[in-house]
Image (cartoon, rainbow, N blue to C red):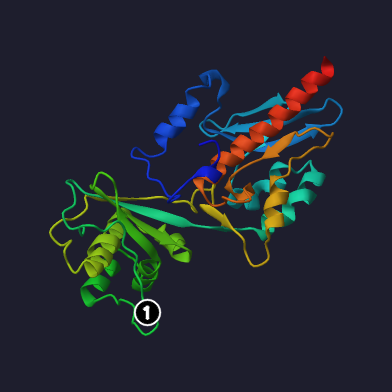
């Protein structure tokens, strides 16, 4: 399809081999000498006399600082990253800060972490004809409490049982992967942040031995995961979370303002993209992807118009 407006049925899709193959495909069209990997952009400044941008880079491997000049920048970092770094990176651009700072502050940025349980063989305990497992607790139902043995294990691992209980209560859903050797556990909100302090052994124990054992009535006891892998979205200082949302003080106008290009000389010098800038598909991969396409179209339209004017 040409746009995400044409998507039908469920908007949730599972990539069999993950996003790496998708990213590798996009990278295949870019010469390696035109990519700067392991480099952090620490400053962007516009020179209004030469009408050019200077971008300061810090190599994360050796700490070397370098500068490059360009006519345009497409900025795609998360709102979480902007909350911590926006004013510092664009410190020489007060008009840009005035344009976007309030919207960056207004928009919320949350965390949903995935714990991937890895098994040595295809799992045999998952119920037939069950795609996902969503825990539901009624108003009058008591939440699951840790027993004496579970508390003892957590104490041995230097984990506060109340924190472990908090993480278990934050499980949104559980689903098997297409290969059936993996089970994916989604943990959201403040519980997702708390889970980032747990090691692999504790995560596997919480998700398999306690959570799955409870909801699948002990059917998991004969098959244990060989390891647990978790995404650390909030701990990653280049992300600080995984999705934007409209907080109580935010509105769609904040997304619009965040999306607006910075035009210090009437030309789109810094064009903003990312899921938080999309008016319809925020908090999604396809929203992030489409926002990048839209940013490219803004520059393409300008360059084509400028080329026509020079003819």
Q: Is residue 150 left or right of residue 41?
A: left
Q: Residue at x 72, y 48 (%)?
A: 87
Q: Position of residue 264 (x, y in %)?
A: 82, 37
Task: Give SS at disc 1.
Answer: loop
Q: Residue at x 38, y 39 (%)?
A: 18
Q: Is residue 157 above or below residue 21?
A: below
Nearest the viewer among 10 and 220 is 10
Q: Position of residue 292 (x, y in %)?
A: 60, 37
Quadrant of the rendered image containing residue 208:
bottom left
Q: Is residue 291 above or below residue 169?
A: above
Residue 137 in view, yes or no:
yes
Dividing the image into 4 quarters, which one contains the C terminus? Answer: top right
Q: Residue at x 29, y 63 (%)?
A: 206
Q: Is residue 166 above or below residue 112?
A: below
Q: Is residue 98 left or right of residue 150?
A: right
Q: Position of residue 117 (x, y in %)?
A: 28, 52
Nearest the viewer among 224 and 216 is 216
Q: Which residue is mark 1?
A: 138
Q: Residue at x 37, y 64 (%)?
A: 171
Q: Is residue 251 left or right of residue 230?
A: right
The residue positioned farthest toward the bottom in the image shown = 140
Nearest the viewer among 159 and 306 is 306
Q: Residues within 10 Å of mark 1 (few under 14, many from 20)?
A: few
Residue 72 in view, yes or no:
no
Q: Is residue 20 left or right of residue 182?
A: right
């Amino acid at each position: 399809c040409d746009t995400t407006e044409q998507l039908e049925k469920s908007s949730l899709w599972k990539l069999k081999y993950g996003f790496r193959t998708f990213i590798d495909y996009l990278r295949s069209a870019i010469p390696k000498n035109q990519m700067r990997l392991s480099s952090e952009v620490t400053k962007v400044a516009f020179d209004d006399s030469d009408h050019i941008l200077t971008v300061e880079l810090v190599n994360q491997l050796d700490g070397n600082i370098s500068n490059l000049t360009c006519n345009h920048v497409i900025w795609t970092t998360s709102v979480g990253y902007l909350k911590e770094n926006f004013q510092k990176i664009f410190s020489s651009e007060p008009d840009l800060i005035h344009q976007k700072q309030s919207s960056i502050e207004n928009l919320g940025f949350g965390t949903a972490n995935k714990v991937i349980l890895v098994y040595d063989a295809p799992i045999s305990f998952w119920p037939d004809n069950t795609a996902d497992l969503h825990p539901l607790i009624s108003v009058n139902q008591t939440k699951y409490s840790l027993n004496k043995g579970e508390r003892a294990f957590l104490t041995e691992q230097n984990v506060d049982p109340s924190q472990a209980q908090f993480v278990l209560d934050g499980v949104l859903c559980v689903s098997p992967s297409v290969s059936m050797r993996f089970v994916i556990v989604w943990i959201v909100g403040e519980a997702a942040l708390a889970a980032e302090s747990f090691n692999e052994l504790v995560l596997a124990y919480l998700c398999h031995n306690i959570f799955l054992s409870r909801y699948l009535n002990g059917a998991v006891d004969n098959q244990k995961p060989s390891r647990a892998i978790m995404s650390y979205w909030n701990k990653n200082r280049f992300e600080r979370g995984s999705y934007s949302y409209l907080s109580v003080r935010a509105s769609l106008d904040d997304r619009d303002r965040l999306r607006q290009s910075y035009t210090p000389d009437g030309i789109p010098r810094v064009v903003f993209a990312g899921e938080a800038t999309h008016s319809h598909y925020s908090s999604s991969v396809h929203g992030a992807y489409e926002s990048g396409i839209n940013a490219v179209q803004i520059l393409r339209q300008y360059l084509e118009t400028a080329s026509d004017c020079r003819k």
